[in-house]
Amino acid sequence: MLEDVTSESVDAQVCDQGLTLSTVRSAIPSSLLVPSERRSWAGLLRVCLVAGLCLWLLSHLGADPAQTSAAEWAALGVVWLVYGLVLVGLFVIGHDCGHGAFSRHRIVNSIIGYAVMSPMLNGFHTWKLTHNHHHAFTQLRGQEVDWGAYLQTEAELSARTWRDSFIIKLGYALPFGVFLWIGWNTLRRGVMVRGVIGEARYAKERRQLLLSNAIMLTCQIALVAGLLSLGGWWAFVKYHGVPAYIAGTFGAFIIAAGHANAQSLVFDRGDWSAARGQLSSTYNVRFPRIVEWMICDINIHIPHHVSIRIPWYNLRAANEALKAGWPELVQESRFSPRDLAWSVRTPLLEEDPERGFYRLRVQH
């Protein structure tokens, strides 16, 4: 991997060489694009066993919050953190199911996808459609469904009013407004899916979307009711509320880290291509090995955007293949809290019409 790889240098390589995703994908052995039933089920079992261990530990800690010692609170914090990260890993397995990368059998992908997504407040089919939309239009203005959906040039932002662009204006007014947008789009993708995928697709998928959300709501009601009957509000908070919050927060951060930093580029439709969108602003942000183990390596994100068919347990090998075949396309770095400095104030877009993209104008 080259040390001076940047989003702009990657984009230049894509444009100068006329690269397509299929050309880049050819560097990855085809065997890594095929799910192994054994490894998929073993991964699911591993995550479930660690989650079960966390639940068992929680059952022996903090029986009464009013009488919990400082040492017990510290232990609770550690277990909550581990459990939250493990739930991210469980979500990644559901994510594989959505891409048909857990099993070679569609029915198995659907059953496991619903089983692992529903307890985490995700309608499986709803999530799958909106997430595939993200892959189909990565970094394309007006279509991207994550953090880049609301980025504006200075002139565009000045022309907007709070009445017609409240979320956009709020994202620019608040510190770390990018993360407000990520949270809002997570909600929007769950309950305002029609606006994400469009009227025609919504009409076609409406029945399955309703079923997906009904399964998710039924699961949530059963989970909440069961925990409240088991031990009241504290059981809900201890066994599900806090770990789910940690999982959701870290998951939102992973969404940001995989595509957002001070170098990120976005495109208008006339200049966008699948290769430019997927390759120029997708990043591998590396964490300690134990963290990556718990979150099932989803932070190794570039291979996933080269091919959505790669199961999570093949991402490392696929990444090494890309480094060997296309080192000038792999943007990878260790995470540091300093990496978030750019997002304290939401950046404006600065157009480079000659090169056909918008770069971020980071505000200090």
Image (tube, rainbow, N blue to C red):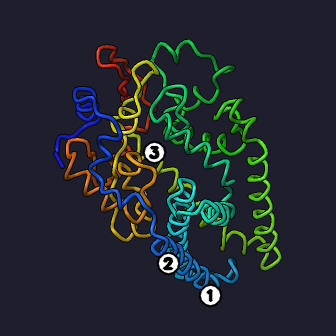
Callout 1 amino acid: His
Circle 1 residues within 10 Å: few <14, some 14–19, many ≥20: few
Residue ID at (64%, 84%) = 59
Sequence-earlier tag: 3 or 2: 2
Q: Which image quadrant is residue 117 in?
A: bottom right
Q: CA distance from mark 1 to mark 3?
A: 35 Å
Sequence-earlier tag: 2 or 1: 2
Indicate the position of residue 297 as horizontal and vertical percent values: 40, 62
Q: Which residue is under mark 3?
A: 256
Q: Is residue 197 above or below residue 254?
A: above
- Towards the viewer: 203 or 162: 203
Q: Which image quadrant is residue 9 in?
A: top left
Sequence-earlier tag: 1 or 3: 1
Front label number (2 vs 1): 2
Q: Which residue is under mark 2?
A: 46
Q: CA distance from mark 3 to mark 2?
A: 27 Å
Residue ID at (16%, 45%) = 2
The quadrant of the rendering that contains the C terminus is top left
Secondary structure of residue under mark 3? helix
Front label number (3 vs 2): 2
Secondary structure of residue under mark 1? loop
Q: CA distance from mark 2 to mark 1?
A: 22 Å
